[in-house]
């Protein structure tokens, strides 16, 4: 397993009225983050807030190319990003203990915080398709270039991990600096990960290692 220290590229926020970050996603232009009673978008180039949607937003956030999926207590809502309207609702596998949400190849991946699990689910029904185990609390999930990454935060340490999507085996670890607990994880599809920073209301950009460097 390859272990490195996370390279923090930039810090965003805090943003007015957003004291905590519960989930992060990227729509190809803007970064969205959940802050309890709304989802907020900012431009990652300028850091300026651009808009927000009033909706329940207590954990992971994901974007499928057209819709935003947002965990709200024990359910996952499918939202119209233009209006914030809830288009559909499915049960969340952790029934309120969920954290982290990602879209990949037509399915959703959901972290289950204290259960230390990551579920792949059907986005239409919420049915669990398979589950992999982690040995730490799961606080964020993302996919990029066929790689599954998840965030952990436990015992005052936090990591961003590349794991085998079949077995859960840790292939590569980015250790976060002391004092930073990741609460939400998303890739920009390039060389950055966006990481929520818990109760600070901030989002960090860290450098993503080049694909295929894990050993």
Image (cartoon, grey):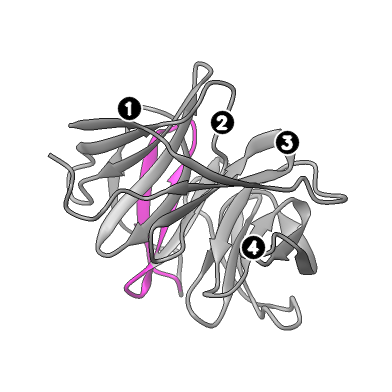
Separation of marks 2 and 1 at Cα, in angstroms: 17 Å
Q: State whether the magenta stretch is mostly helix, strand or loop.
A: strand
Spot occupied by residue 154 in the image (x, y as percentages of width and height): 49, 23
CB atoms of marks 3 and 1 within 8 Å:
no
Kindly identify which numbered label has been placed on residue 181. 2
Taking the spot 31% from the left edge, 31% from the top edge, the residue there is: 4
Distance between mark 3 and mark 1 Cα atoms: 26 Å
| Residue 102 point in image, percent of width and height | 45, 60
Of the residues under marks 3 and 1, which one precedes in the sequence? Answer: 1
Report the Cα–Cα distance between label 4 and label 1.
28 Å
The magenta stretch is 104-123
Mark 2 vs mark 3: which is more N-terminal? 2
Which residue is under mark 3? 200
Q: Which residue is mark 1?
A: 135
Residue 96, relative to residue 2: is it above or below?
below
- Percent from the top left, x then y, of residue 196? 60, 45
Which numbered disc, 2 or 1, marks the residue closer to the eye?
Answer: 2
First reached walking from the N terminus: tag 4 or tag 2: 4
């Amino acid at each position: 397993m390859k272990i490195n220290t996370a390279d923090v590229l930039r810090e965003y926020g805090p943003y007015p009225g957003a004291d905590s970050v519960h989930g992060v996603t990227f729509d190809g232009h803007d970064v969205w983050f959940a802050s309890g009673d709304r989802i907020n978008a900012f431009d990652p180039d300028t850091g300026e807030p651009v808009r927000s949607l009033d909706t329940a937003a207590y954990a992971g956030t994901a974007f499928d190319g057209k819709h935003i999926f947002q965990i709200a207590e024990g359910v996952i809502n499918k939202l119209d990003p233009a209006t914030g309207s809830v288009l559909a609702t499915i049960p969340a596998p952790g029934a309120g203990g969920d954290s982290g949400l990602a879209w990949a190849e037509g399915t959703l991946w959901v972290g289950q915080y204290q259960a230390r699990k990551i579920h792949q689910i059907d986005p239409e029904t919420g049915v669990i398709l398979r589950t992999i185990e982690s040995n730490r609390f799961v606080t964020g999930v993302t996919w990029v270039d066929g790689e599954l990454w998840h965030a952990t935060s436990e015992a005052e340490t936090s990591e961003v991990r590349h794991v085998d999507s079949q077995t859960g085996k840790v292939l590569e670890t980015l250790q976060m600096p002391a004092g930073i607990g990741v609460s939400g994880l998303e890739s920009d599809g390039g060389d950055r990960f966006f990481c929520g920073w818990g109760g600070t209301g901030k989002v960090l950009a860290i450098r993503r290692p080049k694909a295929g460097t894990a050993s």
